[in-house]
Image (cartoon, grey):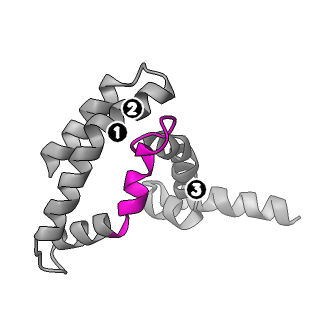
Amino acid sequence: MLAVIARLYEIERACKEKDSVERQSLRAEHATPLLTDLDLWLAGQSFLPKSLIGKAATYTRNQWTALNRYLEDGDLSIDNNAAERAMRPVAIGRKNWRAPDVLSRTSGRKKAQDALLAMFETVAV
């Protein structure tokens, strides 16, 4: 399965500089058969449902339509890494600025607590 995924990404690297029509054509020619074989392989396997591989296989089967969506449009990416990278600063900022986390991870806990209390007092006044 990992070899199939690696091959799908090789196909994407090969058609990265192509326009969307050529990219869609290359995907149809090379990626579609790989995904068809992967689908058949998954259908023929039986995994313990609560095992990690069983959960991964179930997730893959449940998301099969979404996984194949990129084959239909040459402008779509094989993954959502660009969107994930764009959202990372928001998620990290939200995590870093939650007061309980700041207090629990700060070595100078008392100083951080005093600074936060002073900030809240000035806002409340």
Q: Does dot 2 land on a helix, a strand or a loop? A: helix
Q: Tell me the residue at 28%/40% (across/down).
A: 31
- Residue designated by label 3: 94
Q: Which is in the foreground here, disc 1 or disc 3?
A: 1
Tell me the distance, in whole angstroms, between the alpha carbons under discs 2 and 3.
41 Å
Residue 40: give its label: none
Q: Amino acid at mark 1?
A: Ala
Question: For this rendering, which residue is in front, 119 or 35?
Answer: 35
Q: Tell me the residue at 72%/59% (across/down).
A: 118
Residue 28: give its label: 1
Question: For this rendering, which residue is in front, 43 or 28?
Answer: 28
Q: Which residues are magenta?
A: 62-80
**Above or below: residue 69 compared with residue 49:** above
Tell me the distance, in whole angstroms, between the alpha carbons under discs 1 and 2.
5 Å
**Above or below: residue 113 compared with residue 1:** below
Crowd tier of the residue under label 1, counting other residues whose Cα lies within 10 Å: few below 14, some 14–19, many 20 or above? some
Crowd tier of the residue under label 3, counting other residues whose Cα lies within 10 Å: few below 14, some 14–19, many 20 or above? few
Q: Amino acid at mark 2?
A: Ser
Lower sequence index among marks 1 and 3: 1
Residue 25: give its label: 2
Q: Which is in the foreground here, disc 2 or disc 3?
A: 2
Relative image position of residue 113 (x, y in whole percent):
59, 62
Relative image position of residue 89 (x, y in whole percent):
55, 44
Q: Amino acid at mark 3?
A: Arg
- Do the CB atoms of the residues marked 1 and 2 lie less than 8 Å apart? yes
Crowd tier of the residue under label 2, counting other residues whose Cα lies within 10 Å: few below 14, some 14–19, many 20 or above? some
